[in-house]
Amino acid sequence: MAVKIRLKRLGKIRSPHYRIVVMDSRQKRDGRAIEEIGLYHPKNDPSVIQVDSERAQYWLGVGAQPTEAVVAIFKRSGDWQKFSGDTSPSGIDPQAEKRDKTALFNAALADTADEPSVAAFSGRKKADETSTEAAAAETGAGETSTDESSTEA
């Protein structure tokens, strides 16, 4: 029997939660598992990864083949490094707390001193209109001077 360590999908549409399970490779994706050895919740911020390290080491030791996604999760938890003897560090880093988006926006607004850094696109239109008005005023001024000269003669 070919045994695989893979993800079993749970949860609603667009809100997946996975269980890391050991199951026969011929079973359906969400079928009956031999054993559940962990959890993976990718939508949480930061994502939740919980692996029963002892059971994962056991199943890897007896020949269960992990899928690519499970290998990536095991590398982040450090279980793959224990099994393979790899010296690369595990990938779970402590994540800094996220700042509130409103606070970030207010800080950015304070940095710009309430002035936009880029001119508005409508500003160019106004500049073109003023140049056409100035050209019209010049031609209008020329017409008035010819009118005055014709009245004097």
Image (cartoon, grey):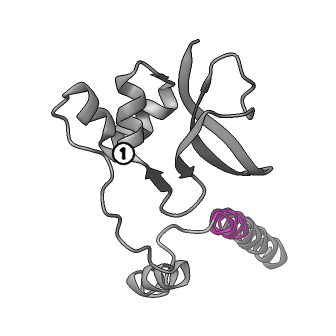
- Would residue 20 be counted in the magenta stretch? no
- Would residue 132 be counted in the magenta stretch? yes
129 left or right of 20 in image = right
Q: Mark 1 highlights which residue? A: 53
Locate residue 97: give its quadrant: bottom left
Residue located at (57% from left, 52% from top): 42
Residue located at (34% from left, 70% from top): 96
Q: Identify whether 105 is placed above or below 27.
A: below
- Pick whichever, 68 or 114, lies toward us: 68
Residue located at (57% from left, 61% from top): 44
x, y percentage for residue 135? 69, 64
Task: Report the span colored magenta.
Answer: 121-133
Q: Residue furthest top?
A: 1
Q: Quarter of the image containing the N terminus?
A: top right
- Pick whichever, 36 or 29, lies toward us: 36
x, y percentage for residue 73? 43, 40
- Pick whichever, 140 or 25, lies toward us: 25
Q: Quarter of the image containing the C terminus?
A: bottom right
x, y percentage for residue 102? 55, 83
Question: Which amino acid, by three-letter code, is at mark 1?
Answer: Ser
